[in-house]
Amino acid sequence: MFILMVVVFVLGYTAIALEHPLKVDKAASALILGMAMWVIFVFGRVDILNMLNETGQFLSQSWRGYVHEAGIENPTSGDMLNFITHYDVMHHLAEISTILFFLLGAMTIVETVDQHEGFKIITDKIKTTNKVKFLWIISILTFFMSATLDNLTTTIVLIALLRKLIADQKERWLYASMVVLAANAGGAWSPIGDVTTIMLWIGGQVTTVNIILMVFLPSLVTMVVPVVILSFYLKGDIERPKLNETETKEFTTPFERNLLFYMGVGGLLFVPVFKTVTHLPPYMGMLLSLGVIWVTTEIMHRSKPLKDRRTLTVMGVLRKVDVPTIFFFLGILSAVAAMQSAGHLTLLADWLNVNVGNIYVINLIIGVLSAIVDNVPLVAGAMGMYEVAQAGATGYEAYFVVDGIFWEFLAYCAGTGGSILIIGSAAGVAAMGMEKIDFIWYMKKISILALLGYLAGAAVYWAQVQILHY
């Protein structure tokens, strides 16, 4: 059953990748994959949870912790079933739900601003139609926005902007893909820019100033290299979409458009502040912002005709939110969670530690794997595998002190490696859902660029370490 889980994961992943040839929506494949993994886990629980590592401990870290906390000496099949159904599933559901509600809140806020033509404030300022200049503007804007907000929210906002600026779908796919690369690169050097850096920051492995100083330049190179390469190939001008403004002009004013834009951006910027001040999960800050915007639209449009109110209030906007993307997230994250609980990721981490050893190579491999498997459990596995060393540690242990090379490079690799495949990061999945980007198209057109940028940034980080004599 342990091996069967891997086989099913590969088959499900293949179905997602071949969405267009199969003519089956990736959300459906992801849901079947996610639920099937847990079904196999439940039926094979005795064999899977009794697997031991080289030290004679249970391979599954979560099962090991559960048995220890519950004081179970001779676990039975019933104990295992109780662990999976009443503890582990609910534990992962809580983690996944925070991502889903965050995504749902962010998408709704962006759609509300878009419905009020709020993004005209930005789109009207981007005058150039030159493809190369436009690429640089969008990439730099995304890179710094991602560090301030986070890579997922920034991607949602920028793709909403691209819809207003680019008519051709395939051309929009290209720029949306570059937004994903820039968003992941921008999120890697900021403690609040990516889920993985947030995990390392909150866990005490890295500090704010140091992660910015050491990872900024490698992240910038990761973004710049693909942009420079594409600049040699892009020719001509972008065709702007012919926007039908008559509908919105009938029931929105410049004041309403500006108000919703600033409230939307302010609401998104409020999330990291909310997280820092309250220490509550970011999705709560996002939903609080959504609630305020919801009330504002209800009050703002209450005197308008019923048809207009239904179009402009959040209630009407919710009908336009891409729900299949939410289901896709649920399915793929559930599948990865099952592999984490069963011990597959722990086994992989242990193998890397024993057979590779070199911290640079380990992190590079983790980064590449994060393009296939969600980077959150990979980073969580690395955090669980290595303890933070005491200050003043020498030799190999020195790599694992607070702000040590291993943790900094892990933040870079896990944050940017996911760009190699479209489903390797939350930003990529959001872009794929919003723009219906084809998995195979992304592999052909973008994956090599992302890999070159990833390796170039890694080389820059290594050079920094050598120059600074860490």
Image (cartoon, rainbow, N blue to C red):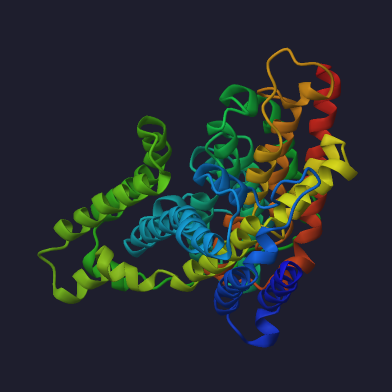
Q: Is residue 132 left or right of residue 327?
A: right
- Which residue sits at x=62%, y=47%? 64
- In terms of depth relative to the viewer, which is nearer, 464 or 300? 464
Q: Is residue 13 left or right of residue 82?
A: right
Image coordinates of residue 83 in percent, x first then y, are 52, 58
Can I make out residue 425 in this image? yes
Image coordinates of residue 69 in percent, x first then y, are 52, 42
- In terms of depth relative to the viewer, which is nearer, 372 or 191? 372
- In terms of depth relative to the viewer, which is nearer, 457 or 223? 457
- Which residue sits at x=13%, y=68%? 304
Q: Residue furthest left?
A: 303
Can I make out residue 129 in this image? no
- Which residue sits at x=84%, y=19%? 395
Q: Is residue 418 left or right of residue 146?
A: right
Image coordinates of residue 373 in percent, x first then y, are 68, 58
| Picture quarter with the N terminus | bottom right
Q: Residue furthest right?
A: 355
